[in-house]
Amino acid sequence: MEHKSNSFYNPYASTLDGLKLYDPASAFFDFCREREKIRIARESGSPPPWSDDPIFQKARFLNVFREDDRGSRAIIRFAGGLDKDLPLLVQSLFFARWCNRQETLDKLSSEILSEPNSLNRELENLEPWCNHTAYPVEPVNWREKKYSRLEAATTLFKEIKVLLSETIVGAKGEVISATNAVNNLFRMQNNFPIFMAIIDLAWFRPDVIDPASHVPTGIGAVAYLDRLQKHFGLDNHRQTCDKMIVLQKEYWPEAKRAFHPIDIEYLSCECRKYYSYVNRTKLFEGKNVFHPASTINE
């Protein structure tokens, strides 16, 4: 999911221009049902192809539910059991999102976060230690000092974990408020890594971050959410997400769980990618191409 603040140039803004979607809500849930069917078939050990749709056969898409993606599963494993120690849980989630590499997280235990020197040595042996392509992670500007991605992940978050936790608790469950409050400390132009760590916290501590809280719209989701908003005649993306959550009961009542705003935002990005292929504004190339080498989830 590509995500930046709305002040950034959006390279995806025009990718759906000219595409006729008479019912983008129905098209959204069509995408969800087919992608979920693929996940279930793949996890059951069925051989590919898992879909008759040529776009799904060729292109790479995230799972419908974030918790089913292998990166999310790695984070859930890495931070598992820390829910009673909120500062350490927050440190673990910020480290995980600054790392954002499943292979690294799978080789580490959260216990090593208390030993920055040992952590640095481990990461030196795991080149690359982080995922450089999923989303940009800028330096953190903390009290007149600039911390690189590695310095923030290994040293800074340990030093400020209590303050970070207090700042997040002060947002009273709201994802957007918590993200903004932390970024007032970090002063990053692109707050997406912060947002991801905050929304991940809802998996472990829904009393601290409400899973049903509204979320900011990432640039990858704008084009499709705009389509939905216009279709419904609504005023903003927040209202649009709320409408789609209600419509899930009509369009996809058999889904394994109810959607939250984060799901609608995240899946609007995936729908934008899918219908960009339909619109021929996106090409099957590079990291976009799916290679069914195993039954491990993307």
Image (cartoon, helix red, strand yellow):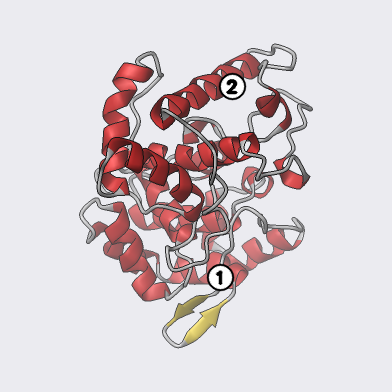
> Mark 1 sits on what residue?
138
Give the image location of residue 68, x and y in percent.
Answer: 53, 30
Quadrant of the snapshot with the C terminus: top right
Q: Is residue 188 left or right of residue 203?
A: right
Of residues 151 and 12, the one drawn nearer to the viewer in this rendering: 12
- The amino acid pointed to by label 2 is Arg
Asked if 179 appears above or below 226 in the picture, the reply is below
Which quadrant holds residue 19? top right
In what element is the residue under mark 2?
Answer: helix
Please say if the residues under marks 2 and 1 sit with CB atoms less than 8 Å apart.
no
Q: Is residue 295 left or right of residue 137?
A: right
Give the image location of residue 32, x and y in percent.
Answer: 49, 25
> Mark 2 sits on what residue?
39
Is residue 234 visible in the rendered structure shown here?
yes
3D distance between C-alphas at marks 2 and 1? 33 Å
Asked if 123 appears above or below 282 in the picture, the reply is below
- Give residue 79's mark: none
Asked if 180 appears above or below 141 in the picture, the reply is above
Q: Residue at x 33, y 26 (%)?
A: 258
